[in-house]
Amino acid sequence: MFKFLKKAKASEVTLYAPISGRLMDLSEVPDEVFANRMVGDGIAIAPSGEILVAPCDGTITQIFSTNHALGIKTPEGLEILIHLGIDTVELKGKGFARLKEAGTEVKRGEPIMRFDIHEVEKLGKSTITPIVITNMDAVSSVEKAEGEVEAGASRIMTVRMND
């Protein structure tokens, strides 16, 4: 009867592994910007796979010209940055192949980028891949998973949005 008095349940967004590998805490990332959560909170993956997939349904908001990083926005308004490797912008695109373009709507598990981890390592860069929520002001809590993950199939974070 008095539905207007009931508080609406805050929305939750489940993020799945964008690449197969082992989950790591952001504090372990060998880059102080990510390790100190200056861009936002999240998790990182030490990758074993080479295909980056959408971690959720959403829209690709940006893909850097060097293909080393991209942004995705979910229908709930969560903004996610995926950064393939550390200092990989210096590779000027070598080791990365774009499979989708900015502005494309994607479904969880849909391939977005090919990431040649062997080439990137050979060129002297870390392949550790941070997945960061860049609009933490819209988030009330983040629950993170641990262990080995499979791209598109394993949950890495459950994010509760503010009411």
Image (spheres, rainbow, N blue to C red):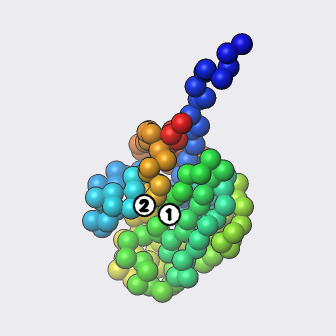
Q: CA distance from mark 1 to mark 2?
A: 6 Å
Q: Which mark is residue 130?
A: 2
Residue 62 visible in the picture: yes
Which residue: 59% across, 51% down? 77
Instruction: Judge from the rendering whether residue 57 lies leftward or rightward of residue 65; answer left or right.
Output: right
Query: For the residue labelled by badge 1, is the local secondary structure a helix, a strand or a loop?
Result: strand
Which residue: 54% across, 56% down? 79
Residue 22 visible in the picture: no
In what quadrant of the picture does the N terminus appear? top right
- Residue 157, given in percent of the width and then of the height, sits at 49, 44
Question: Is 59 located above or below residue 153 in the figure?
Answer: below
The three-letter code of the residue at mark 2 reads Pro
Q: Residues within 10 Å of mark 2 (few under 14, many from 20)?
A: many
Q: How many marks?
A: 2
Instruction: Judge from the rendering whether residue 142 lies leftward or rightward of residue 111; answer left or right.
Output: left
Question: Is 32 located above or below residue 142 in the figure?
Answer: below
Q: Nearer the viewer, residue 76 or 129?
A: 76
- Residue 131, given in percent of the width and then of the height, sits at 46, 58
Which residue: 45% across, 39% down? 140
Question: Is 90 located above or below residue 157 in the figure?
Answer: below
- Residue 141, given in percent of the width and then of the height, sits at 43, 39
Query: For the residue labelled by badge 2, is the local secondary structure a helix, a strand or a loop?
Result: strand
